[in-house]
Amino acid sequence: QVQLVESGGGLVQAGGSLRLSCAASGSIFSFNVMGWYRQAPGKQRELVATITSGDSTNYADSVKGRFAISRDNAKNTVYLQMNSLKPEVTAVYYCNADVRISMMSSSVRRYWGQGTQVTVSS
């Protein structure tokens, strides 16, 4: 079992910045992919950004140039730096991780955090 705990959400004015953190714990051999998703009121959960084991990144078009995902392998933590925030990004942000849990198996499992609220005021 792997647990993901998000932190860093809150209320910020438009144009401000936040950094979200997601700390993973449990039975972890390696991370294949870690990422952030978000779900706004009345909308489906959508991908925000991902980072692979090779540190390649992928972003939703709407956040390119403003958000940056990074990871600290020693701490099993992924971050999402969010700059130039707009009210449209208000949502619950969820951390996810595709985790290889054993050296004996190449299979991966997907885990989700509980979410952290990000609210951007105009």
Image (tube, helix red, strand yellow):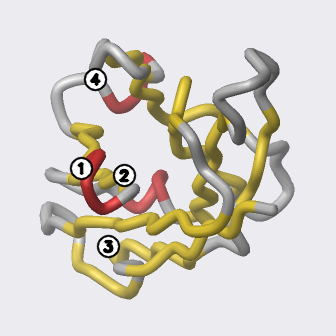
Question: What is the residue that sits farthest to the bottom in this orientation?
Answer: 11
CB atoms of marks 1 and 2 within 8 Å: yes
Amino acid under disc 2: Val
Amino acid under disc 4: Lys
* Along the viewing direction, whichever of 118 and 36 lies nearer the viewer: 36
Of the two numbered discs 1 and 2 in the rendering, the one whose residue sits closer to the viewer: 1
Against 95, residue 26 (above or below) is below
CB atoms of marks 3 and 2 within 8 Å: no
Q: Please give the label number shown on residue 72.
A: 1
Categorize mark 3 by other alpha carbons within 10 Å: few (<14), some (14-19), many (20+). Answer: few
In which quadrant will I find the C terminus? bottom left
Amino acid under disc 1: Asp
Which label's residue is closer to the chain start, 2 or 4? 4
The secondary structure type at the circle numbered 4 is: loop
Residue, x 17% and y 26% (percent of image)? 65
Which label's residue is closer to the chain start, 1 or 2? 1
Image spot of residue 109 (x, y percent): 81, 36
Of the two numbered discs 2 and 4 in the rendering, the one whose residue sits closer to the viewer: 2
The secondary structure type at the circle numbered 3 is: loop
Of the two numbered discs 1 and 4 in the rendering, the one whose residue sits closer to the viewer: 1
Q: What residue would you read off at disc 3? A: 122
In which quadrant will I find the N terminus? bottom right
Which label's residue is closer to the chain start, 4 or 3? 4
Q: What residue would you read off at disc 4? A: 64
Which label's residue is closer to the chain start, 3 or 2? 2
Which label's residue is closer to the chain start, 1 or 4? 4
